[in-house]
Image (tube, helix red, strand yellow):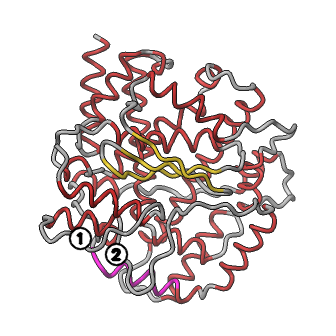
Amino acid sequence: MPQPAEDYLEARVLAHLGLGADPGPIPAAASGSVRQLLTQLAPAGRGAPPTPLLALDTSPTADPAVRRTAVDRRLASVDASALAADFLERRRTGDPWWEWGRPFPLTAGTRSWLLRCGGPVEPVDGLLRRWAGAGRDEEVTTPAFRTALREGRHGPAVALPSADALLRILVPRLRRAGLLPPEHRVTLVRKVWTSAVAVPVRVPGRSVLVQSTTPAVPALAHLLHELAHVAEHALRAPDAALESRWRFDPVRSEGWALLLESLATDPEWLATLGLPSPFTAAVRETAAFTGLLDLQMFRAAVALDDELPPGATPVGALALTAGLNARLGIDRAPQALLQDAADGLRLRSYLAGFAWRDEALGCLTDGWGPRWWAAPAAWKTVRGVLAGDGDARTVLDALASRTAAGAA
């Protein structure tokens, strides 16, 4: 049965997304854990109302070059020393500092996984040149790389389907796998030049999915990732306590989303979608290279946190940031890396999620082979482990156990 706090929680989240009216203060009868959950998911405005996080955007599509210039100008105008001081202050609030403010504490296993999730920071300039087909002396930078990926400039031009067209293909496919129950409603918010994002509103029951109206090669992989999050919202047991239904282990969540997203690198799975082969070839190449690039950029931001001594000063933080930028082999403003590092839990969750994804894929391929996604029993197993609120390791162990039993 829905708890009384759920109606309020739904209204509060929608208001925070710019999609509804603010329902007012948290009800006095709400329990402590529910209060924590509400405070984190949809913090109350102080003074002037906050800018809606995901308000509908009807502005005209901006030229990518103009947008890049605006971003560079904005970053250059930010005081790097002030950003470094702010980051150091965040690190003094807890140990590990990035766990502070969560409504539900992380399990010891997940915390340990997040603490050891870094890895060597390898230069990516060679990766960028290889992808772009550039010569040794040609400059290939991260902004140019990402813009080329988004616009589908992989040699010969490819036709880019709209996000709506991709959804019309992906959603029925995931419904047939049992990942998107029809009773779970999804509100679409369409914006220009934005990344896809999924937000739980009622678990299970309703999610908000933001999608870009701008056609792009990475859109297919991004939609798979966010639809995986929607599936995790939708597959929770409806009769469980509210706190249990909203308890999302970050490593498990990102690992599962990366697992579904990895289908974008599988040529056989892509061939089943009925999309033009030049586009799916671009999708596969883009997903593979952006995965490698993201891995190194996340590692760099985590290394900034891991390598800074407890008593570091802003000057020391900026010096380490410059050194990491040099080790990456690409021209990146120190402000950008500091901003990334400040989002510590998200970065660590992605890095640990890559390892979770690889282990989960190993279980599925051991049970059903490289075409595991064609086996209904594989999806049944995945649905079974996603329905509960177990942490990252518990869910992997359950997946391995059920896979072994199903394949026997």
Foreground of the two, 8 or 80: 8
Mark 2 neighbour class, 10 Å CA radius: few under 14, some 14 to 19, many 20 or more: some
Image coordinates for residue 164, horizontal then vertical, percent = 63, 39
Q: How many marks?
A: 2
Residue nearer the viewer, 386 or 24:
24
22 left or right of 333 in image: left
Furthest residue in direction top, as rendered: 408
Q: Position of residue 236 (x, y in %)?
A: 27, 39
> Pointer 1: what residue?
26
**Residue 65 in picture, x, y percent from top left:** 81, 64
**Distance CA(mark 1)–CA(mark 2):** 9 Å
Magenta residues, start to end: 83-94
- Give the residue displayed 52% in from the left and 31% down from the top: 171
| Residue drawn at the location 36% of the way across and 49% of the way down | 251
Q: Is residue 126 above or below residue 152?
A: below
Residue type at mark 1 is Ile
Mark 1 surroundings: few (<14), some (14-19) or many (≥20) residues within 10 A: some
Q: Is residue 295 left or right of residue 366?
A: right
